Image (cartoon, rainbow, N blue to C red):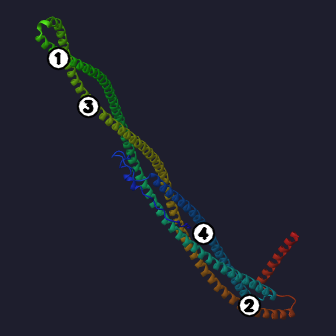
Amino acid sequence: MSRGEFDSRRRIGSFRKANNLYEDKILEASPSLKKPEIDFSEKSSSIARELRMARRDIGRFKGNRTDTDLVKAQAESELYEVYKRAKDLSSEIEESNSMAKSHTREIEVLKKSRRRGNKREDQVLALGDVENQQYADVMRELELVRQELSMLKLDVASVLEEKSRAEKQTEAANTKMLFYTSSVEAIRKEIEDANEEQVLTELARIEASREFADIEAEREKEANQFSFAVEETRKKMKDVIEEIDSSKELETKLSVTMSDVVMLQNELKLVKEMDKRIQRIDSLSRSEPSFHRGEDLEGSPLLHSVTEELEVAKKELAAVKVEGFQFMASMDIIRNELKHLTDETARLRKTEEKSDLTVKSLNSKLLRAKAKLEAVSASEEKARSMASNLSLTLEKLKTEAEAARKEKELACEEAATIKSEILKMETEIDLTEEKLQAAMEELETVKSSEAVALENLKGLIEDTIRARAFESQSSSSITISKFEYDYLTGRAAGAEEIADKKVAAA
């Protein structure tokens, strides 16, 4: 049966390389999240291409199967015609044999009638002409039978050629059916692999979602820690600013105190000069006691007050010095604290910048993770749709394979039936040829016997003519046999019937 050859053999892709697709992680930021190994889009496009090729091949197979059915129906019709023609030829040969036998019987009857009595010359000649005409008709029919037998042989040869071609096409169809069966098995295995990969994809998606939630929680935790650290830094900065303000106030007080100290030092110098002056006065008073006694009495309270003020000034100066030392120590502490706060502020700024970079990196990674998760979800949906399409295609291929198998069995049975019918026809044709050959030999024998009978009849006719001429001279009546009388009366009745029919038709 006619089957078109494929342009190229279909190559069924395998899903086995995708078993490790989601064994690695999805994101690059975390050690547990990596890039997938195989792209689902390329695989899906290759599988869709193979499915289209399979459907096109199935369409070609169906078209070729239709052509084969037409060729088979035509061969069956030709075989039926050949069988019918062989039957017709057999019936014609039987009729020819029966006609030859009837002619032989008539010749024998004529021979017997010749022995019984005299026959008329015209009747015998007419009978001979009729027999010759019938013999010519039989020979023409035999020639037609020979021609039909030769045509029948040609038809049988063409049918055998069609049968061999159909067998070759059946073998090609069986080979293609085996190929389709193997393709169906490969697709079934690929569907099983796709189901396994779908399970792995679902597990990877769940794991990616869990890791995404962990990353979100970690990001929120780091954001909270950073906010707390920023708040603490702000508080420390506020405290440092307050301490700086207080240190400025202390500096102001210190400057005022220093001016007071300078003033007290000036006053102390004045007091010292006054003390020296008083000592000089005391030395002068010792030299002139009588003159200055009244002045000592008047100057001793002043000296006492100055001395007290001097003592108070010394105490205040000592207190100012102590307070100045304390203030200097506090200024050193404030400077150290300010330096520490500056370093802490710089460190916090670096930490803030680093945290900002980390947050940006986490955001970009989260966006990439979301995009990959969406791609994985889309690939999963596509894989599910492809799995359903492959399942439908597999069921369709199984159904078509089963139908093709049944058609193959029917074709094998029909081929066996046609083969047996062809063998039967060949046997019948051989028998018909043998019968035809025997009929030809029998006709040749009949022809030779008829030739001998005609020669004998000619002699009998001449003898009868001479005898009847002699009898006519002696009497006015002629004596004929009962067979001749019946024959002549039957011919006369037939002629009357034909004449009546012609008259009625006219």
Q: Quadrant of residue 209?
A: top left
Q: Residues within 10 Å of mark 1 (few under 14, many from 20)?
A: few
Tell me: 37 left or right of 91.
left
Residue occupying the point 58% across, 72% down: 162
Residue occupying the point 81% across, 93% down: 467
Residue occupying the point 54% across, 73% down: 164
Disc 4 marks a residue whose amino acid type is: Ala
Mark number, residue 276: 1
The residues bearing labels 1 and 4 have C-alpha atoms spaced at a distance of 161 Å
Pointer 3 residue: 336
Taking 43 as reference, is 454 above or below it? below
Q: Nearer the viewer, residue 5 or 300?
A: 300
**Residue 212 appears in view:** no
Label pair 3/1, CB-CB below 8 angstroms: no
* Mark 3 residue element: helix
User: Considering only order in the chain, which callout, 2 or 3, is on the residue closer to the N terminus?
Assistant: 3
* Mark 2 residue element: helix
Pointer 4 residue: 75
Residue occupying the point 31% across, 37% down: 347
* Mark 1 residue element: helix
Disc 1 marks a residue whose amino acid type is: Lys
